[in-house]
């Protein structure tokens, strides 16, 4: 049995939503060392009972800054705006269609 089985999640919920964030940075010396953060967020919903993937959605955003932390923050803010728009609704609708 796997970790999800031992947690007995199927007794409490229908789906489990997981997220994975990746980021890479590029520096443009032609623009005085401007750093661009390219951020990707992958959302995946798994059935608590079968562990099968029910829905998946990927968002990405880029952000500028002269430090990597500033570039990452700008990219995260842009990604959060996407989540607040229609992206999260699209993911939730896809998930709802697969639930019993």
Image (cartoon, rainbow, N blue to C red):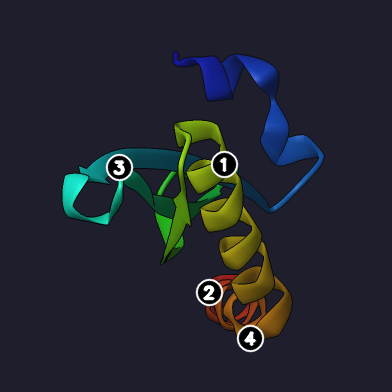
The numbered mark, 1 or 4, whose residue comes first in the sequence reads 1
Q: Secondary structure at mark 4?
A: helix
Q: Position of residue 58 (x, y in %)?
A: 40, 64
Q: Secondary structure at mark 1?
A: helix
Instruction: Identify the residue position indicated by label 1 in the image.
Output: 70
Residue in the foreground of this view, choosing between 99 and 67? 67
State which mark lies toward you, 3 or 4: 3
State which mark lies toward you, 1 or 4: 1
Query: Would you say the residues marked 4 and 2 are in contact, meaning their CB atoms lie under 8 Å apart?
Result: no
In the rendered structure, find residue 98 and report the number of the disc placed on it: 2
State which mark lies toward you, 2 or 1: 1
Q: Position of residue 84 (x, y in %)?
A: 73, 75
Q: The C terminus is located in which quarter?
A: bottom right
Q: The N terminus is located in which quarter?
A: top left
Instruction: Residue at 41%, 51% (x, y): give it.
Output: 39
Q: Quadrant of residue 24?
A: top left
The numbered mark, 3 or 4, whose residue comes first in the sequence reads 3
Up-down relation of residue 58 to residue 42 (above or below)? below
Instruction: Residue at 52%, 56% (x, y): give it.
Output: 75
Instruction: Identify the residue position indicated by label 4 in the image.
Output: 86
Q: Residues within 10 Å of mark 2 (few under 14, many from 20)?
A: few
Distance between mark 3 and mark 2 Cα atoms: 47 Å
In the rendered structure, find residue 33 and report the number of the disc placed on it: 3
């Amino acid at each position: 049995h796997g970790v999800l089985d031992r947690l007995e999640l199927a007794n409490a919920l229908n789906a489990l939503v997981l997220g994975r964030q990746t980021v890479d940075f590029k520096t443009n010396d032609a623009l005085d060392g401007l750093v661009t953060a390219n951020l990707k967020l992958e959302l995946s919903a798994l059935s608590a009972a079968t562990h099968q993937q029910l829905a998946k959605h990927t968002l990405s955003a880029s952000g500028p800054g002269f430090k990597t932390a500033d570039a990452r923050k700008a990219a995260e803010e842009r990604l959060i705006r996407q989540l607040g728009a229609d992206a999260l609704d699209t993911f939730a609708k896809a998930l709802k269609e697969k639930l019993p």
